[in-house]
Image: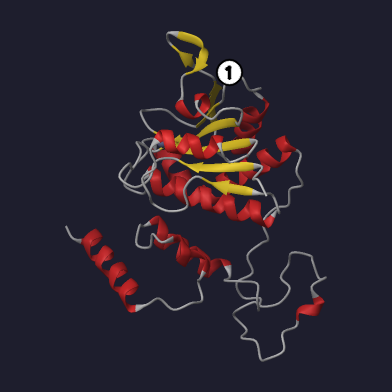
């Protein structure tokens, strides 16, 4: 099935992006946000694709072609800003309405990230063409570029480092509202409760597992949030890069992978 929306994590691989600071790099931050949004849209049963799901180099032309040929109606490009400013910016195409970027800005603001501006920009020598590559080269797909905040602004940087998941979630809310798709907030994390949780849905009564289920693992519900957060942290830090591991929190790592992680950690800590 063709995706309704395609998510684009800015930069990647040899291109770290410009929105970097001591706490994060743009390419990793945008990847984490994108993968979070990817999982959430899947949870909401909204067909979704991504341009990249790991730390790979993706040239602009290839990136735009992936979006153009995806069959998606919408594209959300995730970026972190730099250069002295404060707050989010949302850039949209001169051929698209302002409603979607407006909603995104409002939801990010509601989540505590002020909005600097939403805007369009045209080529200096051609007022009928968008200035930004992804707005211009993604065909009929409605593409918005989100700069979530400024990596070189301490307030934005702290907010992003601590709260990137909620900012990513804010965009899911905006998207569902704009595309008129049913939205449900993420289930609250219940690390100590192996049972039904507080999500209110007691309807999964048939799922009492036969063999003795371990108490700290909610059956087939997957890895609990506190464990997944630790795994996500490994990706944020660049210690793990293969996205296949991300969803396999309960599986053991082979020795070579442990060796790679330790080697990366050693390289990071080396003065
Ligand atoms: Zn960027």
- Residue lying at 42% horizontally and 33% vertically, measured from the top left: 61
Picture coordinates of residue 205, whole percent (x, y):
81, 77
Count of numbered circles on the image = 1
Q: Nearer the viewer, residue 194 or 44?
A: 44
Residue reaching furthest to the bottom: 212
**Residue that carries the numbered disc 1 in the rendered image:** 94
Q: Nearer the viewer, residue 186 or 8?
A: 8
Q: Is mark 1 within 8 Å of ligand 1?
A: no
Closest to the observer, 51 or 218: 51
Residue 18 is left or right of residue 220, and the answer is left
Mark 1 lies on a secondary structure that is loop
Across and down, in percent, residue 242 comes to 41, 61
Residue 105 quadrant: top right
On the image, the x and y values in percent for residue 186 come to: 67, 56
Q: In which quarter of the image is ligand 1?
A: top left
Colouring method of the image: secondary structure
Q: Considering the image in quadrants, where does the C terminus appear?
A: bottom left
Residue 175 x/y as whole percent = 66, 39
Determine the image quadrant of residue 268: bottom left
Can you say whether 181 is above or below 122 in the image? below
């Amino acid at each position: 099935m063709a995706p309704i929306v395609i998510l684009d994590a800015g930069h990647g691989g040899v291109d770290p992006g410009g929105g970097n600071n001591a706490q994060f790099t743009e390419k990793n931050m945008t990847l984490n946000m994108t993968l979070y949004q990817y999982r959430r849209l899947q949870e909401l049963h909204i067909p979704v694709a991504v341009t990249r799901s790991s730390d790979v180099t993706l040239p602009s032309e290839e990136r735009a072609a992936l979006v153009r040929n995806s069959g998606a109606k919408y594209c959300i490009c995730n970026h972190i800003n730099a250069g002295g400013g404060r707050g989010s910016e949302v850039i949209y195409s001169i051929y698209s309405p302002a409603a979607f970027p407006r909603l995104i800005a409002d939801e990010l603001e509601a989540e505590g990230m002020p909005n600097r501006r939403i805007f369009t920009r045209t080529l200096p020598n051609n007022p009928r063409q968008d200035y930004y590559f992804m707005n211009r080269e993604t065909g009929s797909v409605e593409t918005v570029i989100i700069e979530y905040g400024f990596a070189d602004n301490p307030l934005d940087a702290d907010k992003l480092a601590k709260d990137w998941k909620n900012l990513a979630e804010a965009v899911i809310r905006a998207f569902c509202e704009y595309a008129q798709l049913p939205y449900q907030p993420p289930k609250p994390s219940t690390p100590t409760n192996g049972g039904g949780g507080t999500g209110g849905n007691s309807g999964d009564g048939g799922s009492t597992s036969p063999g003795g289920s371990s108490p700290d693992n909610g059956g087939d519900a997957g890895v609990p949030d506190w464990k997944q957060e630790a795994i996500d942290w490994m990706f944020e830090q660049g210690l793990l890069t293969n996205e296949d591991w991300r969803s396999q929190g309960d599986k053991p790592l082979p020795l070579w992978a442990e060796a790679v992680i330790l080697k990366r950690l050693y390289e990071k800590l080396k003065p």
